[in-house]
Image (cartoon, rainbow, N blue to C red):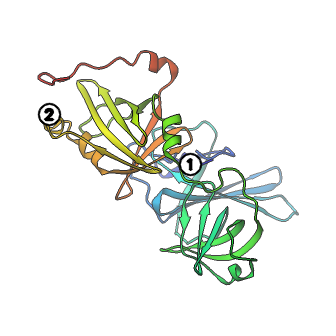
């Protein structure tokens, strides 16, 4: 299952949730979080020390390292990977982290290692992120040429990663290990639900409903105060593209809501992260849609269209 990390910046300190399942990264009214950033912090408890290192990497990928050092005992380290996003939530139980000089981390991942024609690729099970090529002497000790499920320590690079150590491997795979989302996943988990798009500059908060029209295609209906738009979409696994009719785009531009068709035109992929639907553009920008609560769905009537808009 994919993990999403929730982070809330409060003036000079960063606040993260204390949970074993990471969840969506975040800001409201503060400078944006950026890749190649490191936040660190710690506290003393029960005669020992607990430390946290949060690495924000490219592609909204994060590594959260938790280090527990009981007094008189060997420190235990745990790495978690996932995606960080920006939302507007805070958390009641938190640990303050301060900005630190960035250093590239080596960390452990569990996932699928594929080896084809002398080249290797490692797919992280927690996020689906593919590190390719995966290189390093540690790979030479692995048996055969078939795909393996591995627990590896890696050092990420601009392209791919260096595999520093293989901690364990198996020819058997856990269910869904490193698998990419499919058209069927979208139909079963996204279509027919009401998703909430937060307000953007020039665009009010709106409700979104996806409906199927056939295998790998369908329609998206967006409604909000003085706003209604229907756009077609096409699916290819994790790939997702939208098309908006020219007359609808012109009408929205006349109403000052041209940001909506522009946003939809930029989308290239989708993912489900911690119950939220993330639409990602070609330049890596992400738009986060949250699933509406049951009471919100029941009362989500269609908003009135702008004057002169033909339904």
Which residue lies at the image location 60% right of the left edge and 63% below the top edge? 123
Q: Position of residue 172 (x, y in %)?
A: 76, 60
The tally of labels here is: 2
Q: Height in image: 105 above or below 197?
A: below
The reply to whether dot 1 and dot 2 touch (C-beta < 8 Å) is no
Q: Height in image: 132 above or below 213?
A: below
User: Which residue in the structure is indicated by mark 1?
Assistant: 5
Helix, strand or loop at label 1? It is strand
Query: Which corner quadrant holds the C terminus?
Result: top left
> Which numbered circle lies on residue 101?
none
Give neighbour class at mark 1: few <14, some 14-19, many 20+ (Cα, 10 Å). Answer: many
Q: Which one is earlier in the sequence, the residue at label 1 or at label 2?
A: 1
Q: Position of residue 279 (x, y in %)?
A: 41, 46
Q: Quadrant of residue 52?
A: bottom right
User: Which residue in the structure is indicated by mark 2?
Assistant: 251
Q: Height in image: 116 above or below 253?
A: below
* Residue farthest toward the right in the current orientation of the protein: 72
Q: Quadrant of residue 74?
A: bottom right
Single out the mark in the foreground, 1 or 2. Answer: 2
* Residue farthest toward the front in the current orientation of the protein: 214
Of residue 167 and residue 173, the one placed in the foreground of this image is: 173
Which residue lies at the image location 15% right of the left edge and 38% below the top edge? 253
Of residue 113 and residue 98, the one placed in the foreground of this image is: 113
Which residue lies at the image location 83% right of the left edge and 54% below the top edge? 47
């Amino acid at each position: 299952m994919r993990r999403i990390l929730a982070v809330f910046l409060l003036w000079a300190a960063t606040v993260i949730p204390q949970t074993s399942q990471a969840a969506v990264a975040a800001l409201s009214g503060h400078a944006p979080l950026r890749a190649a950033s490191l936040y660190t912090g710690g506290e003393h408890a029960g005669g020992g020390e607990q430390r946290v290192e949060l690495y924000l990497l490219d592609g909204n990928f994060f590594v959260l390292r938790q280090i527990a050092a009981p007094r008189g005992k060997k420190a235990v380290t745990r790495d978690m990977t996932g995606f960080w996003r920006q939302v507007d939530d805070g958390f009641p139980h938190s640990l303050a982290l301060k900005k630190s000089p960035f250093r590239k981390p080596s960390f452990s991942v569990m996932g699928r290692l594929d080896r084809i024609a002398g080249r290797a690729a490692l797919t992280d099970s927690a996020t689906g992120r593919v590190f390719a090529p995966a290189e390093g002497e540690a790979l030479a000790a692995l048996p055969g040429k078939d795909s393996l499920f591995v627990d590896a320590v890696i050092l990420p690079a601009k392209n791919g990663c260096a595999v520093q150590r293989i901690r364990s491997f198996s020819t058997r795979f856990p269910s869904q290990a490193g698998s990419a989302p499919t058209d069927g996943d979208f139909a079963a988990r996204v279509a027919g639900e009401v998703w909430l798009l937060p307000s953007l500059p020039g665009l009010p908060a709106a409700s979104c409903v996806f409906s199927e029209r056939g295998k790998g295609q369908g329609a998206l209906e967006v409604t909000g105060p003085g706003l209604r738009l229907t756009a077609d979409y096409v699916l290819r696994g994790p790939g997702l593209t939208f098309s908006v009719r020219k007359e609808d785009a012109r009408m929205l531009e006349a109403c000052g809501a041209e940001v909506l068709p522009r946003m939809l035109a930029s989308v290239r992929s989708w993912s489900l992260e911690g119950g939220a639907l993330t639409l990602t553009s070609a330049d890596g920008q992400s738009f986060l849609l949250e699933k509406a609560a049951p009471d919100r769905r029941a009362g989500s009537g269609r908003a009135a269209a702008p004057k002169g808009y033909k339904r």
